[in-house]
Amino acid sequence: MKNKIFFFAFLSVATFGLWSCGDKDDKDGCSTAWATELTNEANDMINAAQVYAMDPTVANCNAYKAAAQDYLDALEPYGNCPALTGQSRTDWQNAFDQAQQDLNEVNCSGN
């Protein structure tokens, strides 16, 4: 359950924070199409979360963690958007850091 909460909370903050980024052609990590550009990673993470929720095995947990890490890795460059300034940048970075910390704390060993 914590995994789902972290994902949806982070996605909400990331969506708000990146909404104002520049054109798709920006070379500084900005894109208004970031959600579309990350569709594969987001879908992979959602699918892995659903599989793990239905069958909470160590293997499915590890698959979920890997998919979530892939999503975070793909999302990270969007934090370099020059349109993210002041509190928006701080909020984005805090949300990203918290998501990474939460993911790092997911224990798949079953303990």
Image (cartoon, grey):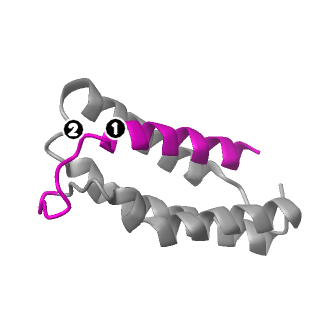
- Say if 99 sits above or below 88 in the image: below
| Label placed on residue 17 | 1
Q: Residue at x 24, y 56 (%)?
A: 31
Label 2 crowd bin: few (<14), some (14–19), many (20+), radius 10 Å = many
Residue numbers of the magenta segment: 1-28
Q: Residue extending furthest top?
A: 87
Image coordinates for residue 40, horizontal then vertical, percent: 50, 72
Q: Is residue 26 magenta?
A: yes
Q: Secondary structure at mark 1?
A: helix
In the picture as drawn, the residue positioned furthest to the right comes out as: 55
Residue 43 visible within the image: yes
Please give the residue where the numbered disc 2 appears in the rendered image.
Answer: 84
Q: Quadrant of residue 64?
A: bottom right
| Gap in angstroms between the C-alphas marked 1 and 2 | 7 Å
Seen in the image, is 104 located left or right of residue 94?
A: right
Sequence-wise, the earlier of marks 1 and 2 is: 1
Residue 63: x, y in percent? 67, 72
Contact? badges 1 and 2 (CB < 8 Å): yes
Q: What's under tag 2, amino acid-wise?
A: Leu
Left or right: 20, with 45 as reference point = left
> Visible in this render: residue 66?
no
What is the secondary structure assignment of the residue under circle 2? loop
**Chief SS of the magenta region:** helix
Q: For mark 1, does the 10 Å Cα neighbourhood hold few (<14), some (14 to 19), or many (20 or more) residues?
A: many
What is the number of callouts on the image? Answer: 2
**In the rendered image of this protein, does residue 21 appear above or below residue 13?**
below
Q: Position of residue 111 (x, y in %)?
A: 83, 54
Tag shown at residue 52: none
Q: Amino acid at mark 1?
A: Gly
**Quadrant position of the N terminus in the picture:** top right
Q: Nearer the viewer, residue 56 or 7?
A: 7
Q: State whether residue 41 is above or below residue 19.
A: below
